[in-house]
Image (cartoon, coloured by chain):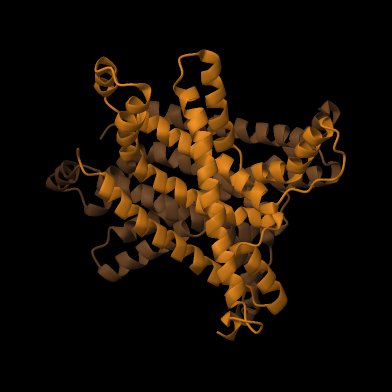
Amino acid sequence: MDIELMINSFPKLLNATLITLKLLSVSLILGLFIGLGFAILRMNNNKLINKFAYGYSYIFRGTPLLVQIFIIYFGLGQIEYLRTTFLWVVLKEPYWCAIIAFSLNTGAYTSEILRSAFQTIKPGYLEAGRSLGIPSKIIFTKIQIPIAIKQSLPAYGNEIILMLKGTSLASTVTLMDLTGVAKYIISTTFKPVEVFIVAGGIYLFMTFIIHNVIRYLEKKYGFQT
Amino acid sequence: MELLYFGDKGWGDELFFATLMTIAVSITAMIIGFIFAALFTPLKLSNNKFLNSIGNAYTTVIRGVPELLVIYLFFFGGSGAIMFVASIFGYNDYIEINAFLTGSFSIGIISGAYSTEVFRGALQSIDKGQFEAAKVLGFNKYIYFFKIILPQMLRLAIPNLSNVWQITLKDTSLISVTGLVEIMRQSYIAAGSTRDPLFFYSFAAVLYLMLTFLSMQLLNRLETKYSKGY
């Protein structure tokens, strides 16, 4: 066991953790909006819109995240037309490609979580709102959304942890996130166990924090309908 | 479409065998996962605090650390560990382990952690009376486990195991980083030599979708078969 290497690599890995956290937070925020949008589309009565939203979540949940990143990072650059538009400014950066892939991916999972949360809201709540003469927009933002958020907290907590692990794939498109730096140190020193312990420890610490924050929120806002 | 021709001209046959490789790795990993689950589920349910903490450590660490990091650990550390063991027995040459075995083993350990949780949940939701009745009736250990507990456990576990299968199948794409030629690696090679990454990665996505779709159909059938009441 090479303790010195572990101590020396710790600051480097901690530095890379910042990129991991940045990727995670930006894609979670974008993914939440995407997920909410598609969850609303899923509850639409129009069959075509409904099928579209279902297809989106099916495709992104049925394929590996790695394929999605590769299509966006390597694939989209091949379309000549895209290179001439302003989108190319975004798509030539691996950082933004990773964020797009992560957001779309977590958006698909989030839409499923939110959809099932919306569907478990008791109809009595909506009827009560309607009979009090509250406009349907306000029923949605003030009654449905808060209840759905409470309902989906446990599942969403799992999704955050899955996404934290998913950000490790950013290292495959040349980004130096926590896993990327860990791999670099492993391949230069050939000491996989030591680096795994330090990098894995940082990841476990983050999952531990996320887990407890979610549990605290669950307790605070109560898990009841 | 020419890109998908079989034979020397296209990549059809290569991608076909790569798909078989993905299936083979997924199934092997799933079986290795079951072996790990069979070892760790009793530990997680054990009353002994020490054994219990070993079981918990396994599932917490594996489910909290990115799959890619676990794969790097085994990819870079695997041959080193085996060479260390071999050197104890006086064998000092370089040993390279097969990419298929490293891949299946690392994905298997990951899938095992999820399976362990599934089996633990299933065992805990079997009615306590079933265990007690089996004991009171004096069945031997074989009948107790294989004829009474296991069928009830499987019935509860199958829906969740099909989720584990989905996760395992998708995780196999990650072992392309070790050079094993499965769907992802083959698409990477094809994309590199034809300069058509969009087509090949999209096709890889279609292959994965087909695999998940077909396996879901099969597993749903299994699920309805086993969810019949006794």
Residue B31 in the image, given as x and y percentages of width and height: 51, 44
Q: Quadrant of the C terminus of chain B?
A: top left
Residue B155 in the image, given as x and y percentages of width and height: 31, 40
Q: What residue lies at 75% left-to-right and 40% top-to-bottom?
A: B77
Q: What residue lies at 41% left-to-right and 30% top-to-bottom?
A: B120
Residue B186 in the image, given as x and y percentages of width and height: 64, 67
- Judging by colour alone, the chain drawn in orange in this rendered image is B
- Judging by colour alone, the chain drawn in brown in this rendered image is A
Q: Quadrant of the N terminus of chain B?
A: bottom right
Name the quadrant containing residue B135.
Answer: top left
- In the image, A140 versus B225, the foreground residue is B225
- In the image, B73 versus B146, the foreground residue is B146
- In the image, B200 versus A168, the foreground residue is B200
Q: What residue lies at 63% left-to-right and 69% top-to-bottom?
A: B187
Work out whether residue B201 can be spotted. Answer: no
Name the quadrant containing residue B45.
Answer: top left
Give above or below for B56 relative to B8. Answer: above
* Residue A38 horizontal side relative to residue A100, left or right: left
- In the image, A69 versus A3, the foreground residue is A3
